Image (cartoon, helix red, strand yellow):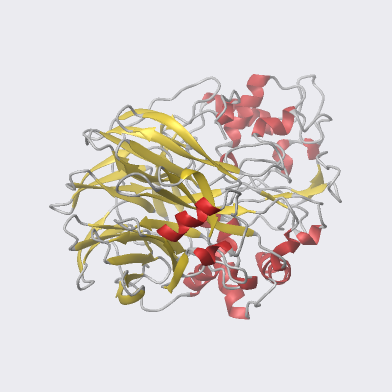
Amino acid sequence: MNRPKLSHPERRKPQPCGLRRRRTCISGFLLSSSTRLQSCRLKIPIACAMLIATALFRPAPVAAAPKPSLDFTELYASPLELLTSRDGSLLYVLCEGTGDVRVLNVATGRTLRTIPVGHNPRGISFSPDGRRLYVTNSWDDTLSVIDTQTSQVVATWNAGWEPSSVAEDPAGQTLFVADRIGNNVTVLNAATGAVEGTLEAGRGASYMAAAGRRLYVTHVYPNPGPYRTPPHSEITVIDPATAQVTDRIPLHSIAGAFHIAISRDGRLGVVAELHPKNLIPLAHVEHGWVFVDTLTVFGADVGRPVEIPLDEIDRYYAMPFGVAIAPDKSRIYVTNAGSDCVTVIDTRRLLAYIRAHRRPFAEDLSASAHYVIARIPVGKNPRGLVLSRQGAWLCVANRLDDTISVISTHTLEVTRTFHLAGPTHVTALRRGEQTFYSAQYSFQGQFGCSNCHIDSTFDGLQWNLEPSGFGRNIVDNRLIESLRGTEPFKWNGMNPSISVECGPRTEMFFWRSQNYDERTLSDLVLYIRSLPERPVRWLAADGQLTPAQQRGQAVFQRTIDHLGQPIPEQNRCSYCHSGPKGTIQKSFDVGTKSSTDSSGLFDTPQLTSIALTAPYLHDGRAQTLEEIWTLYNPHDQHGRTSDLTKDELNDLIQYLRTR
């Protein structure tokens, strides 16, 4: 969808203002994906800020975060992305779990060097001349600059909010960083790291591919749109020479777009994506599918963008993530992160099928048989992949078993498996994470927990779950970080624990298939309960509340309204949203029951990371925090707010973002 000009304060682009340090302790367990433990009581520096109604902060200088010493006997590597050196002799492996880049000998798989970077590194790329390697550290909000000759980090720069990928323009003058929380692309000077501007991208901007005079950016959450309409995403196209957005290629009905690849001649582009069917009851698990696993192909070789399915009639290939195009464009390779395999597509057959079918066929499960030529089993949760320069072999990063699969593109078989240094045993926490990211438990392998909770977060969608009734009780998907102390679960508060939420209920209404045994469920619950809150980025450099946030706190805590009338206890913000996580853990009627709701009682949601999780209310009808009180609180049941001015609402919102 075209990005509209937005006037609400909470929709404006965040601007960097400073740092805050937060401690996170998870009993010594390691977390990977969007959460990772470096050491108990880990200090995480956070670049944070926001253009707010009355104040604009200036960036404070950021020093490189002190890096804990790494003990490979305790931490899983969790390889996420791969690159090869220009001569093809070296394989660079970005390890999310241990926070480093490992340099492997391609011929032997032996680790030659290990380069520590920041916390939760997510993206990696070379400079055009190959002399520098860039790594985005998503929880540090920094960019590590590595000299490839010395294998040393030579600079650490600020890089927006939750930087997820990076690319440099062909001239080597400008860096572009996709910021997942900022929903934009930060433009940096490639020589100094100075911020030169920001470009508005899709919500959850995360992955990039450069091709000549074009830079393509995808995003993992759907763009804001009207309530109960199909999700909509885009490929943001940037001219790196001018640092301007030149196009936005629409991705209709797409709610998660991941890796994108462009052919060497620039005529063929491919993006891996999710096409959810969230507007109809989830009863269709065994009658169709909940997600269509698709690619969108575009470019001069295709004409208009075309969405193509990867699934088969009785088998699904969940969570397409990484994508690569052969040097001669003969094949397209896709990692299916939830199905532990690589899908191989014959490009010639695909283009012929597209030309023969004028109508959309993304939901035709018979289509993939015409162009998919192989499904290659690899390790657990395959993510990034890289082809050799001549296309003779393909390497795949298996994130949840710490291996690299080497595939012969001639035989389409795994010929070697490189094991990265790390624990040889699998902990209960690691088993729980493997279950969370696997689609093997659902009927015909359709989807897993991570389909709706991308990178262990949320998806920005609303669903009609079958237990609630067909076409009734629409629910907004909630964030699953820092869930301890927020029970009960579901918007109606019916599930008292994570074990109930993820056990019988999930097996009956979601998987329609294999049941968890006792250990599998226990491990899964352990993983979910261990997910920490991500860094808070809306505080000033000293970690204190700003004047606007202090005024908002006063509104949040007030007991008397502007007319001098006492506010009933149960209608005070600070009563329902009390405690360290902002929930009293009870249900209330706040006047938001709709014609499709069976009850007007709704569980009080925690305020943890509330700034990130739009839309709002139990069914996601409020696009912004402001709409909760300006559109959906006419009788002051959801807090006494009718007497507040626009500025006071803005201040309240600024305070809520710090929770």
Residue 595 visible to an observer of this rendering: yes
Residue at position x 27%, y 37% in the image: 169
**Quarter of the figure that contains the C terminus:** top right
Residue at position x 33%, y 75% in the image: 411
Residue 39 visible to an observer of this rendering: no
Count of all numbered marks drawn on residues in the image: 0
> In the image shown, does 408 or 29 lie closer to the viewer?
408
In the displayed structure, 316 sits above or below 295; it is below
Residue 641 coordinates in the image, percent (x, y): 75, 27
Residue 491 coordinates in the image, percent (x, y): 74, 52
For residue 166, which quarter of the picture? top left
For residue 642, which quarter of the picture? top right
Residue 551 coordinates in the image, percent (x, y): 60, 25
Residue 554 coordinates in the image, percent (x, y): 64, 28
**Quarter of the figure that contains the N terminus:** top right
In the displayed structure, 504 sits above or below 168; it is below
In the displayed structure, 269 sits above or below 563; it is below
> In the image shown, does 592 or 409 lie closer to the viewer?
409
> In the image shown, does 437 or 430 lie closer to the viewer?
437
Task: Find the residue positioned furthest to the front.
Answer: 356
Task: Find the residue positioned furthest to the left.
Answer: 149
Residue at position x 61%, y 63% in the image: 365
Image position of 172 (left or right of 368): left
Image position of 335 (left or right of 554): left
Residue at position x 51%, y 27% in the image: 546
